[in-house]
Amino acid sequence: MSSLLQTPTQILMDLGIRDPGDLDIEAIAEYCGATIRYKPLHGSEARILGYKDRAIITVNSVSSRERQRFSAGHELGHWMRDRGQVAFQCEDKSFTREWSANNPETRANRFASDLLLPVPMFRPLARELPVTFDTVRRLASTFQMSLTATTIRLVEHGWLPSMLVCNTDEGKAWFVASSELSGKLWPVNRPGKNTVAHALQSGANPQSPQDIRSSEWINHPRADRYWIKEDSVMLRDRTVLSLLWWEEEEQLLDQEEYEERRFSERSDQRRDWE
């Protein structure tokens, strides 16, 4: 059985897994000291009970295979990272809305992604594919993984500057951005009225993806000068996932020049005060 402190990468290396078709979550869980069982669950997608060095992971038998695999990986993340707590029972929203906070649910989601969407396998398959939900569905089918987890992987390890924004009826829940955008551009608190996401939340069935003016999504003084691509989907709990990507890097270059100019102006002001 594996050590509690092993990372997903170490687990896969120990098991000699190098191909998506070999990512057998039941076998991996047994190696980690957990047995996966399937039965109908009400009010949750999965739960785990552990005692000493053994655990039972129960996964909702009526869910899709992709959701079952991610749910099992998520609970395994609790087992490997949060052992010692009495039990976890995870609802569907844990898998779609917990991706940015520093809490056990987010850590379990990340563990499941690293285990079942390993970057060395994922990146070559995603190379030069368009940043759309059609691409996500193709990759999700290859890895038998959930839409949300696969989309985050595509944003973080794809080849175009991109962003994934999760919105609920209350507004922005979280977002992730590719390395080119991280710390440089931020989404608005609510998608603009001309976005695909807003149309979905209003009950419409818009064409997607679409060219959208950047200011509808991005909080920046010059955003209205540029256009971005948006592809959005509505999940079953009225959560909307929106993929945004930049085919042209002009806005990103302009952003860097704008920030450099502001920094220079602030530096000049500080020198004047001294």
Image (cartoon, rainbow, N blue to C red):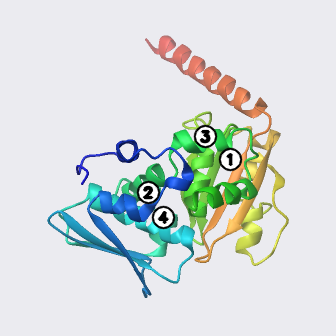
Residue 139 vs 157, above or below: the answer is below
Q: CA distance from mark 3 to mark 2?
A: 17 Å
Q: Secondary structure at mark 1?
A: loop
Q: Residue at x 41, y 67 (%)?
A: 72
Amino acid under label 3? Arg
Q: Residue 190: in sight, yes or no?
A: no
> Residue 123 bears which disc, if any?
3
Check disc 2 and report the residue beneath it: 112
Q: Secondary structure at mark 4?
A: helix
Check disc 4 and report the residue beneath it: 70
Q: Earlier in the sequence, mark 1 or mark 3?
A: 3
Q: Earlier in the sequence, mark 1 or mark 2?
A: 2
Residue 235 vs 23, above or below: the answer is below
Between label 1 and label 3, give the one nearer the viewer: 3
Amino acid under label 2? Ala
Residue 40 vs 169, above or below: the answer is below
Q: CA distance from mark 4 to mark 2?
A: 6 Å
Q: Secondary structure at mark 3?
A: helix
Left or right of 27, for residue 242: right
Check disc 1 and report the residue beneath it: 218
Amino acid under label 1? Ile
Q: Residue 46: in sight, yes or no?
A: yes
Other residues around mark 1 within 10 Å, as few (<14) / some (14–19) / many (≥20): many
Q: Earlier in the sequence, mark 3 or mark 2?
A: 2
Q: Quadrant of the C terminus?
A: top left
Q: CA distance from mark 1 to mark 2?
A: 30 Å
